[in-house]
Amino acid sequence: MPPVAPQPVQLTCPSCSTTFRAGIYTLVDVTQQPELKSALLGGQLNVAVCPKCHTASMLGAPMVYHDAGKQLCLIYFPQELGNRPEEQERFIGEATSFIMRSLPAEAPRAYLLAPRRFLTLPSLVDVIFEADGISRETLDRQRQHVELISELASRLLDEGQFRTLVKQRHAELTSEFLATLGAFIDATPEAQADSRELLLQVQDRLLAVLGDPDAPSEEEVTAAVEQLLAVTDEDLAETVAELRDMIDYAFFTAWTSHIEAAEAAGDVTAATQLSERRAQILTIIEDLDRQAQAIFDAGNTLLSEILATNDFVAALNERAERVDEAFMMVLSANAAAAQRAGRSDLLTHFEQIGEAAIAIIQARLSPEERFINELLMAETPQAATKLLRTNVAKINPALVMQLNTLADQEEKRANKPTAERLRQLARESGAMLF
């Protein structure tokens, strides 16, 4: 089957009112056009750029994602389009019929009869990454990196606060985190020069505070190689993510020595398996970097769309499903750049957008989560205790369990102060139940 060309659409730039044509993909068949997968994961698919003012806009359109190799058929309908059920079924039927006709006669087809549907594009993208062996835990870890980068950027203007945050979150500032930061810097487009400059400042300040991190010892590299030699294919992606800071030139040199030893011994099977496993590790690392870039690109794209409208708050609310940590980080970077440049007008705009974004995120929280946030935001432990005593009706076994669960998560992230505070709140809440 020849490549499917994008459908031409006539657009009017929301920023300068220039009329221009752009292409939009409604069928993304990565079996035939693998380059479309990278564009989608990188946040570059169905993005129109005005030829006059260079404003980027995300084009809302239904999409069918197909990967015959992984037997994936994923459907996305933007909620803002308001397609009627019969319109959706007709679109899906036409697309899947077209795909079936393009497949070889012996190719599996059953998965096309029950395509998975998604209300948000990020949730569809998560499934693609998971099919590539990137676990939900790895995706969550990447998002935690985004959150930490945002916090560091927000404290650049205060050296003391920056150093305090680095000290508190030192265990999270791994080579994997620095690689994520580097990927974000590389992914920042020229149009967001201020954001790129701020991220470079975060990177430079981190290296100055942390010093040049020591390379892993020979023993650590050897242990990492042995662990990745022994791990199953099912656990490989998660293990690579855990050992990311050990996987460098020395690691691959040690790995190559195993391949050469197997070849010297005439064990062709072992040498082949080792070479294949090395290729798998390289692919996983590339996917991790690509996912980090996709998250940051999505935040950049959303902010560009918002700034291209006349009503920032209304535009953000219309795109509420796309408000996440990456967007908050990009917004924080731009606000800090505006403050340094003395652009009070831009800073006011960013603050308005920030308030609306926080309201959107708060609205997603359950009553228990909102109450826990209030407790954590209390200025002192005594103030948090007072808040508990004045809200006895909100204290129940589920709240205590959630506090302990959050404490476990923070301990895994090596965020000891927050974990201890959550444990204390859980103990106090539990005592009030009796």
Image: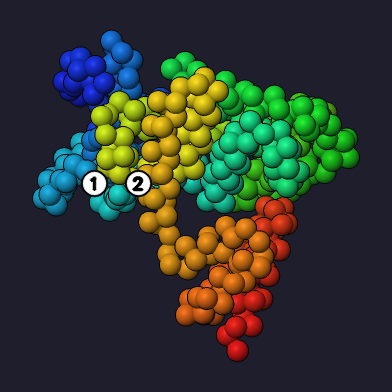
Left or right of 264 in this view: 312: left
Labels in figure, total: 2
Query: In this view of the protein, can residue 242 be seen by the observer?
Result: yes
Residue 280: x %, y % from top left: 61, 36
Answer whether residue 99 is visible to the viewer in this image. Answer: no
For the residues marked 1 and 2, what is the alpha-carbon distance in whole angstroms?
10 Å
Q: In which quadrant of the rendered image does the N terminus lie?
A: top left
Please, is residue 81 above or below residue 16 in the view?
A: below
Q: Is residue 384 above or below residue 220?
A: below
Left or right of 324, for residue 249: right
Q: Residue at x 63, y 48 (%)?
A: 238
Residue 166 in which image quadrant: top right
Question: If you read the primary sequence from the N terminus, does the residue marked by circle 1 or circle 2 appear first?
Answer: 1
Which is nearer the eye, 428 or 44? 428
Q: Position of residue 317 (x, y in %)?
A: 30, 44
Disc number placed over residue 402 in the picture, else none: none
Q: Are marks 1 and 2 in contact (CB under 8 Å)?
A: yes
Spot the residue most to the bottom.
Answer: 434
Identify the element where label 1 is drawn: helix
What amino acid is labelled 1 in the image? Answer: Gln
The residue tagged with tag 2: helix, strand or loop?
Answer: helix
Q: Residue at x 69, y 40 (%)?
A: 161
395 or 105, which is in the foreground? 395
Labelled disc at residue 321: 2
Q: Amino acid at mark 2?
A: Glu
**Disc 2 crowd, CA 10 A, few/some/many (<14, 14-19, 20+):** some
> Which of the pair 250/328 is nearer the observer?
328
Report x, y in % for residue 211: 81, 29
**Quarter of the image with the C terminus in it:** bottom right
Q: Nearer the viewer, mark 1 or mark 2?
A: 2
Q: Which mark is residue 79?
A: 1
